[in-house]
Amino acid sequence: MTALFVPLTLLLLAQQAQQEPWFSDVTDEVLPGVRVTCGSVTKDWILEVNGGGLALVDLDRDGRLDLVVVDGSTRERVLEGKKGLPPRVFLGRAGGSFEAAGEAWSMDGDGWGTGCAVGDVDGDGWSDLLVTQWGRVRLFHNSGGQGLEEWTGRAGLPVEGWHTSAAFLDFDSDGVLDLFLVRYLDFDFGEQKPRGEAGATWRGQSVMAGPEGLEPRADLLLRGLGDGRFEDCTGQLGPAPAAFGLGVVTLDVNQDGRMDLYVSNDSHPNHLWVAQEGGGFLEQAFEWGLGYGANGREQAGMGIACADLDGDRRPALLVTNFSGEPNALYLPAQRRGAYRERSSRAGIAGPSLTSLGWGAGFLDANLDGALDAFVLNGHVYPEADSVGSDTSYAQADHLYVGQGVGFGVRPLTKGKSFVSRAGVLGDLDGDGDQDLVVLTLDGGVRVLRNAAPGVGKALVVQLVARRGDRDAPGARVELTIGKQRSTRLVSTCAGFQAARPAEVHFALPGSEKDWTLEVFWPGGGRSVVRSGEDSGGAVHENGSRLLVRVEQGS
């Protein structure tokens, strides 16, 4: 069976390569020359292979998305006692271009940057920035859209460890954002041996060691106090073994109105933290069918995407995995409280088998009403380019096109392949469809413009909550057109080491003018906006983009 499956996979990839991509690389036009560093090019240590982070957020509230790039460091800088490379802010400009922000937005280097999260930690109406690192976690307060002020010293955040992804959520419904931190493993340049000395091999090649054989770190939960400070409340996470954590999404897995957490773990079963009625979380991935792959074994989970694919209010989950393991698509089963791994049936398993996936996300690229998914790929071993390997170091990124039942696959862009890592979606040029920013390993930050042959119009929803984070993370937004319902969950968590805008996107068929929008607010309350009435929301139409702004209480 295996001998037949690999040639079939190669045939699928050959067919995919002949299809016209839906995204075009416009980096040279809008963000030229922005590069990142993550250790040595030979990748002698595991710290050097995961890459940095990205965020798309409107920091100055001018209506354009700004970009945050979290950079890494090198072993030499660490051993010499030098600071890491600083995170950078690029302010959005007309047409989807960016320019380097001024001194007020600058951040100095510190540890080895890995990822980021975005949320309003003090309820002042402005999005703040959290940076995860190999080292201390850092918090930067948004000073009314005029710049960033470091609040790390007062925040009470962890000062050591390898933190990968992070998620803001209000788990105790007090109107204040709390924080979930994903952690990977114990690492020390003085204790771990480099490639060639560690004895690790892959397909006969000497490679860097890990994660197997290294010590995993348990994830952390911190309660927000409302003034930019946090206190550790990890004890409210039920018992679960520590794992090599990489990605995280927020979701409402059981539709009880409380935010749950799903974590992708490398070489360990994934974790599903289900919020309990009396407070706290229980880890229930096994009970829900979300811990293992289709073969009943743990996989090397990297990134995650989460969305309701069919309007039943139950989220589907896409987990990207190591090469030789297909990406996993978990769909809700008919029985409530259960999932089934359906990547083969959905057309995702075969095309993903020889790739190593990282960042992922669901979107409606061509605005036809069916959600698509992007997956960013790139190996961890430069040795993957060796003769005889069925994979490669740089790899093509994929777009899985929703076809009602299952997905078809096509290349994300034309041209050469990259060693991709984190990615984040956002409407950069204001035309309604979602574009994509990609961080590559030891390379450039890429900006990919959505050029899909759109068949509909975009309906973009922005929420304004009465208290706490004005973006209303955890709100559920439902669009009904005739008998067809689509749902979106508001979240700024983008799966793998990235943060996305809080606005949600729907597709409006070209001939359809009657629609109803419902917002179910965190903590209770409901708002309704109907087409043609502007009841409860400010509706603005601009070409192919219909913007609906809903304020709580309206």
Image (cartoon, grey):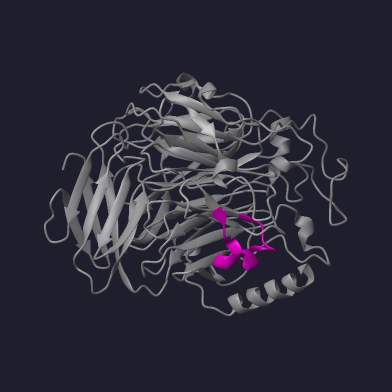
Asked if residue 90 is positioned above or below residue 368 in the image, the reply reads: above
From the image, which quarter does the N terminus lie in? bottom right
63 sits left or right of 414 in the view: left
Left or right placement of residue 367 versus residue 459 in this view: right
Is 134 or 260 nearer to us in this picture? 260
- Identify the residue at image location x=26%, y=47%: 519
Against 460, residue 227 (above or below) is above
Residue closest to the eye, 313 or 93: 313
Q: Is residue 102 above or below residue 468?
A: below
Residue 169 in percent (x, y) is at 41, 35
Left or right, 276 with respect to 58, comes to: right
Front one among 84 and 411: 411
Q: Is residue 151 visible?
A: no
Q: Is residue 347 in the magenta section?
A: yes
What residue range appears in magenta? 340-357
Which residue is found at the position 36% from the left and 46% from the top? 490
Residue at point 68% right, 51% down? 296
Residue 547 position, x and y percent, is 24, 57
Residue 211 image-quadrant placement:
top right
* Place of residue 179 in the rendered image (x, y in percent of width and height, measured from the top left): 46, 31
Where residue 508 sits, quadrant-wise, is: bottom left
Q: In the image, is residue 124 part of the stretch drawn in magenta?
A: no
* Displayed quadrant of residue 387: bottom right
